[in-house]
Image: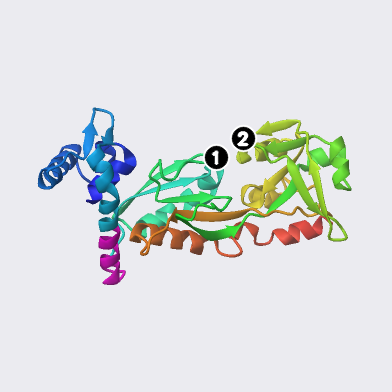
C-alpha cells in the first residue's frame, strides 16, 4: 500500500523505490503482486513515468487511509517503536537552506542514521502536493487547511549598507531620503514599510538600481558598496557583526510581518520522519534565533 501511494505521489516507480529503499525491479514485483491480489490494474507504466488507471484513482484514497492508519498504529506503541526511516523530501528557500539548514545536518543525520534526506532548494514556491514533499520551509503561511503550519522563527528585516557607501553618499535621515539613494532589492520586495517616530506606519515603493532574485547576492552587492539593501537578519548577520554592513536607517525600523514556517500535510498522526525533522528545526532556531542574538547592540550603537 505504501509503495503504491508513493508511486502515485511521485509519478515514477523508480523514484518511489529509491524513496523506500527498494530496487526498481523489487518495487515493480511488489506492485504486480498487489495488482494480482486485487484483480485490477492500478497504473499505466512507461519507461519514464507511472500514471493512475481509473481503478488506481478509485483505489488511491483508500490506500492512503490504510497507510495513515498503519503509521498511527505504529506511533501508538511509542516513539521508540516508530523510529524515523525512509526518505524525507524537503523544500526550502535556497539562501536560507545553505546558510542555516545544511550546516546543521551532520548533527541531525547522526541522530537519525536510518533517515535519508532529499533536499530541494529554490526561491520559487514549489507545489508541495505535486512534488510529493513531506516538509517545506516557507516565509508565508499557507491558507490551505490540508497543511499544518508550524512557526519556526521570526524573520526580522533591516536596511543595511557598507561603510564605504555611507561615507560616499551619506546616511538617509528619513524614508523619503531613499529616493536620492541607490537601493538594492531582493526579488519583488520593493515596498518597504517603516515605523515612524510616532508609531505611525510609513510605506515607500522603491525604484531599485539593482534587483536580484537571491538574497545572498544582494548582500554581496551591498557589501561591495552598490547601495542600500533591505535584508533579512538571517542573511546579513555575519556581515553586520564583522562591520562589512551597518544599519542604514536605524531611526525608522522596518515593519515585517514575515515569519519562517514549516509546512507539512495534515493528518491525525504525524509521520515519525516529519515529526523529528520539524522538532529539530524548532529546537535549532527557537523564538529568538541565534542569528538575531546581539544584533540589537549593533543597531543601538548606530543610533
Does any portion of residue 19 appear in the rendered image? no
Which residues lie in the magenta part? 68-81
Residue 123, horizontal then vertical, whole percent: 55, 39
Which image quarter holds the C terminus? bottom right
Residue 232, horizontal then vertical, whole percent: 66, 49
Secondary structure beneath dot 1 equals loop
Residue 277 is left or right of residue 5, and the answer is: right
Residue 150 is left or right of residue 187, and the answer is: left
Q: Are marks 1 and 2 in contact (CB under 8 Å)?
A: yes
Read off the residue under disc 2.
Answer: 213
Residue 70: in magenta span: yes
Residue 220 is left or right of residue 121, and the answer is: right
Q: Residue 76: which disc? A: none
Tally the marks: 2
Q: Is residue 113 above or below residue 96?
A: below
Give the camera-side residue of 147 and 300: 147
Give the camera-side residue of 100 and 213: 213
Does any portion of residue 47 appear in the rendered image? yes
Q: Residue at 50% of width from left, 62% of height from top?
A: 282
Read off the residue under disc 1.
Answer: 123
Amino acid at each position: 500500500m505504501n509503495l503504491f501511494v508513493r508511486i502515485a505521489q511521485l509519478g515514477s516507480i523508480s523514484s518511489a523505490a529509491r524513496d523506500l529503499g527498494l530496487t526498481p525491479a523489487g518495487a515493480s514485483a511488489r506492485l504486480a503482486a498487489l495488482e494480482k491480489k486485487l484483480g485490477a490494474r492500478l497504473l499505466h507504466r512507461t519507461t519514464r513515468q507511472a500514471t493512475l488507471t481509473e481503478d488506481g484513482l478509485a483505489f488511491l484514497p483508500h490506500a492512503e487511509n490504510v497507510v495513515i492508519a498503519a503509521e498511527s498504529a505504529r506511533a501508538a506503541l511509542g516513539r521508540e517503536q516508530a523510529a524515523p526511516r525512509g526518505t524525507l523530501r524537503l523544500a526550502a528557500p535556497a539562501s536560507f537552506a545553505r546558510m542555516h539548514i545544511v550546516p546543521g545536518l551532520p548533527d541531525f543525520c547522526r541522530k537519525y542514521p536510518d533517515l535519508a534526506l532529499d533536499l530541494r532548494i529554490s526561491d520559487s514556491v514549489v507545489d508541495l502536493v505535486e512534488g510529493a514533499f513531506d516538509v517545506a520551509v516557507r516565509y508565508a503561511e499557507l491558507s490551505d487547511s490540508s497543511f499544518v503550519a508550524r512557526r519556526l522563527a521570526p524573520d526580522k528585516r533591516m536596511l543595511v549598507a557598507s561603510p564605504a557607501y555611507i561615507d560616499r553618499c551619506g546616511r538617509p535621515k528619513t524614508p523619503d531620503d531613499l529616493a536620492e539613494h541607490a537601493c538594492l532589492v531582493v526579488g519583488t520586495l520593493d515596498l518597504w514599510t517603516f515605523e515612524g517616530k510616532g508609531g505611525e506606519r510609513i510605506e515607500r515603493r522603491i525604484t531599485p538600481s539593482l534587483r536580484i532574485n537571491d538574497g545572498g547576492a544582494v548582500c554581496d552587492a551591498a557589501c561591495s558598496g552598490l547601495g542600500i539593501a533591505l535584508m533579512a537578519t538571517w542573511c546579513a548577520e555575519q556581515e553586520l557583526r564583522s562591520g562589512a554592513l551597518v544599519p542604514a536607517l536605524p531611526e525608522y525600523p522596518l515593519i515585517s510581518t514575515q515569519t519562517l514556517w514549516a509546512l507539512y500535510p495534515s493528518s491525525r498522526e504525524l509521520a515519525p520522519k516529519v515529526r523529528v525533522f520539524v522538532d529539530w528545526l524548532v529546537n535549532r532556531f527557537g523564538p529568538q534565533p541565534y542569528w538575531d542574538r546581539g544584533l540589537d547592540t549593533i543597531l543601538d550603537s548606530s543610533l
